Amino acid sequence: MILGAAEVKLSGTVWQLARRPGPDLAALLTGRPCRMAQTSAAHLALGLPHDADTGAEVARDHLARLFVTLRRAFDLPPLRPDPDGVLGPLARLPRTLSGLSDWLASPLPAAELGRAVARGFPRGRGRVRPLSWPTGGEIGAFENSPAGRQAGHPLLRAVEADQGRSPLWRYLGLLADLEAARSLPAAVRLPDGTAVVQAARGAYALRLGQAAGRVTSVLRVTPTDHQLAPGGALSTALATLPGDRPDLVARLVALHDPCIPVTVREAQHA
C-alpha cells in the first residue's frame, strides 16, 4: 500500500495509528517513458546516470528540522539554520554519557532542544524496541531513520544501553547523522535491480521494471513505510504515551518525521 496520510487517535487509553492509502504509484508511472524518472533512485534503478552524493540534501533537511521544525514542535522559537552551531568543534556530539550531561547543560541551540526532548519524554515514554536497519526493498517494521543509520555511533550505543531507543536517542541520532552527512553509505543497485539511496529520513528503495523504454512495474519502499508499518517504530512509541497527552503525540510524530500528513484526533467528550 502506498501511504497517503495517517491519523493517530485514542482507543480506550492507548494511542493507535491508522494508515490511509495514497495514489497508486504504479498506475501513475506504468507506461510512461523512463526519462520521466527524476530522482537518483529512479535513475539508478534504470541504470541511468545519477547523482551519487545526497549528503548536501540530507544536511539541509536536518538543519531545517533542528533549527525550525523541531524547535516549533517543542515550543522553542525557531532560529536561522547555522551549520557551525551543530557541526563546529565546540558543538560536536560527545561520545559518552558523562560527556552528554555536560553537552546538554551547554547553551548550544542543539543542546537546548535536547533538554526539551529529555524533559518532555521521561524514561520509558516514547521508547521503541530495537529494530533492524533495512538492506534493500524489504517491507515491514525497520528502524529506517537517521538514528537507525547511526545506531553504531558510540553515544547512541551508550544512550540505548542506558534508556533504550528513546526520543532522546532518536534526536541525538539526527545530530549524529548530520555530522556524518558527507560520508553516508553510497547509493547501490542490488542484483534484483532495486536501487537504494540514502535520503534525509533514511534509506529509499526503488525498483522499476521497464520494457521498450517504458516503465512496466514499480516497487517503492520509503523510510515512512518502515516507520509507520504495523509494529513499527512510531506505533510502538505511541503506545507508551498517556492518553491525556496529545501534545506528546504531536512531538513524537515530529521526531519520527513521516513524509505524509499525520493528524492527531483527541478523545471526544460528551
Image (tube, helix red, strand yellow):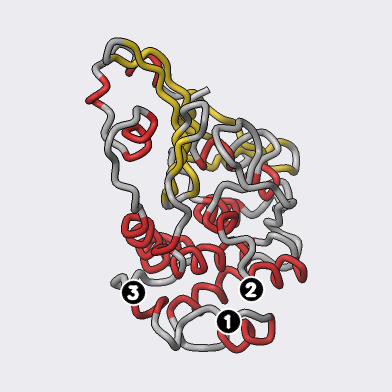
Left or right: where 32 falls relative to 171: left
Q: Quadrant of residue 83?
A: bottom left
Disc nearer the start of the sequence (1/2):
1
Q: Quadrant of the C terminus?
A: top right
Q: Quadrant of the rendered structure where residue 150 is?
A: bottom right
**Which sits in the foreground, 49 or 200?**
49
Residue 182 position in % (x across, y down): 39, 64
Residue at image mark 1: 94
Which residue is the site of mark 2?
155
Q: Are marks 1 and 3 in contact (CB under 8 Å)?
A: no
- Estimate how packed mark 1 is, as few (under 14), some (14 to 19) or many (20 or more) residues with alpha carbons within 10 Å: some
> How far, Cα to Cα, is label 1 from label 2?
7 Å
What x and y, as percent, mark residue 119?
63, 72
Locate residue 107, reporting x and y percent. Answer: 47, 87
Observer-nearest of 269 and 255: 255
Tag 1: amino acid? Pro
User: Residue, x 77% and y 71% (percent of image)?
Assistant: 162
Q: Describe residue 255's horizontal placement relative to residue 62 as left or right.
A: right
In contact (CB < 8 Å): disc 1 and disc 2: yes
The numbered mark, 1 or 3, whose residue comes first in the sequence reads 3
**Discs 3, 2 touching: Cβ within 8 Å:** no
- Badge 2 element: helix
In the picture of the structure, the residue carrying the numbered disc 3 is 83
Residue 85 position in % (x across, y down): 38, 79
What kind of element bears circle 3?
helix
